[in-house]
Amino acid sequence: MTRAARRWGLAAAVAVLLPACAARTVPPPAPGAPRFPEFIAPAVPANLAPPAVVQRHDTGWQSLQAGDLRAAQRQFTAVLNDVPAFYPSAAGLGYVALARKDFTQAAAEFDRALTSEPRYVPALVGRGEALLASGDRAGALVSFETAITIDPTRSALRERVEVLRFRGLQDDITAARKAAEGGQLAEAREIYTRAIAASPDSSFLHRELATVERREGNLDVALAHAEKAASLDPNEPRNFVLIGELYEAQSQLARAAEAYTAAAALEPGEALSDKIEALHEKAAFAAMPAEYQAIEMAESMTRAELAALIGVHLDDLLRRTRRRTAVVMTDTRGNWAAPWILSVTRAGIMEAYPNHTFQPDAVVRRLDLASAASQALSLIAGENPRLAAAWRNPRRRFPDVPPGHLNYAAAALAVEAGVMAPTEDGSVQLTRLVSGAEALAAAKKLQELAEKRPR
């Protein structure tokens, strides 16, 4: 009988017996941690059966994962009594037997499922587990390899197969790991090299050897093995994470970000997203002029440096801001920070002097930082009024800057928004020089506020 005919017959049988199935529906067990997380759920392919049958099958699987093997067997058996060709429930009975360590019965049930659908991966993997537990390593390998051929994304199973293939070398693998853990890296490398000679297509072994070479400082060799591992198993995210780490160690930031992005595409996660974002920031910083890179360590800073900091950290905000009339400045041409000076002056965050100079080399005091911060906060408030309500109309009191002071409003706004901080005695010391670290912290806080989306 062809597969299409079998499926047609199954659908017809289900249609006839559906009322009986629906009548014996039982509620699923309460959810909890699965008792057998390593088991592959025998999913029901689309359009194989009506929802009532699928629901009873799913209840059986939930009972199994809740540890109630009797209830699971009852559910799967009842479905199969009504619909003998419903192979997902046959696989379910296989897993029930596997949970009971009745490996002979488990293999028989999985074979029953595979008789109806030879390409059913949950049954192939379960059959492999049953055969392996029974001591039939060759038969288990056939089942596992067939499952991988059908579903190449199962990286964990692929590694399991690799381990089985060179189980004769397992003692060597254990010895290599032990040697590596004990710092005997040359011995570990020798053992892994020998294992790879016996199993050259093992992604796992190449990744292990890459880790050893990395610890010895052989980054180029380690990278070659990591890339070989990725080529052998492009569905394993750990291969690409290792490649990213090796490129990062070599300061090849763009390539590292590319590798981490490939890993994140296979297995998204916050840790990888943070790595990628940090790399982009490092790459952008590395591309900056030397003058910009030195800002953070400077004890004092210039107006050009402040303009660059604000221009870089508020780049998106400045791009969204309507530009004012071009500002005429006679002393910024050829300055390393000229593009950012132009950007912040057009946006009104910093001002040129009446004599059309910017004075890029003039030192920055806290009153200059407060003024620039307040202008930037005004732009942010224009886009996000609700956010600005938290620091609009500040009522701060400073012992050295009374409310009537010319610079009070700017200082109070900057402090209220968290962009600047008063000293321990509550003063703002507007005439004090600003350090590079202080200005960088202020620019990062402004960027944080600017990136908060209105609600």
Image (tube, rainbow, N blue to C red):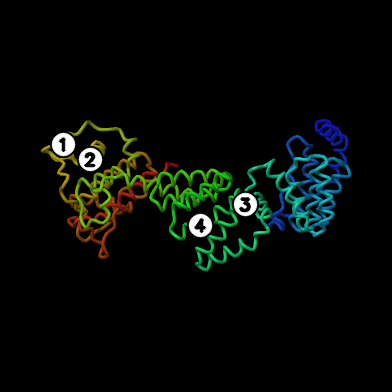
Instruction: Provide residue 157's location: percent of width, then percent of height.
Output: 66, 50
The amino acid on which the numbered mark 1 sits, given as a three-letter code, is Met
Q: Along the polypeptide, which appears first: circle 1 or circle 4?
A: 4
Q: Are marks 3 and 1 in contact (CB under 8 Å)?
A: no
**On residue 199, which mark appears?**
3
Q: From where the camera sits, is residue 409 visible?
A: no
Specify the label residue 329 is tagged with.
1
Of the numbered discs 3 and 4, the one sitting upstream in the chain is: 3
Q: Is residue 405 visible?
A: yes
**Disc 3 or disc 4, which is closer to the eye?**
3
Determine contact: label 2, label 1, CB under 8 Å.
Answer: yes
Residue 333 vs residue 20, the one in the foreground = 333
- Is label 1 or label 4 in front? 4
Quadrant containing the C terminus is: top left
Amino acid at the residue labelled 4: Thr
Mark 1–mark 4 contact, CB under 8 Å? no
Q: Disc 2 marks which amino acid?
A: Ile
Element under disc 1:
loop
Residue that mark 2 sits on: 341
Give the labeled residue for mark 4. 211
Structural crowding at the residue carrying mark 3, measured as other residues with C-alpha within 10 Å and reported as few (<14), some (14–19) or many (≥20): some
At label 4, counting other C-alpha atoms closer than 10 Å, the crowd grade (few under 14, some 14-19, many 20 or more) is many
Name the quarter where the N terminus is drawn.
top right
Q: Residue at x 85, y 52 (%)?
A: 74
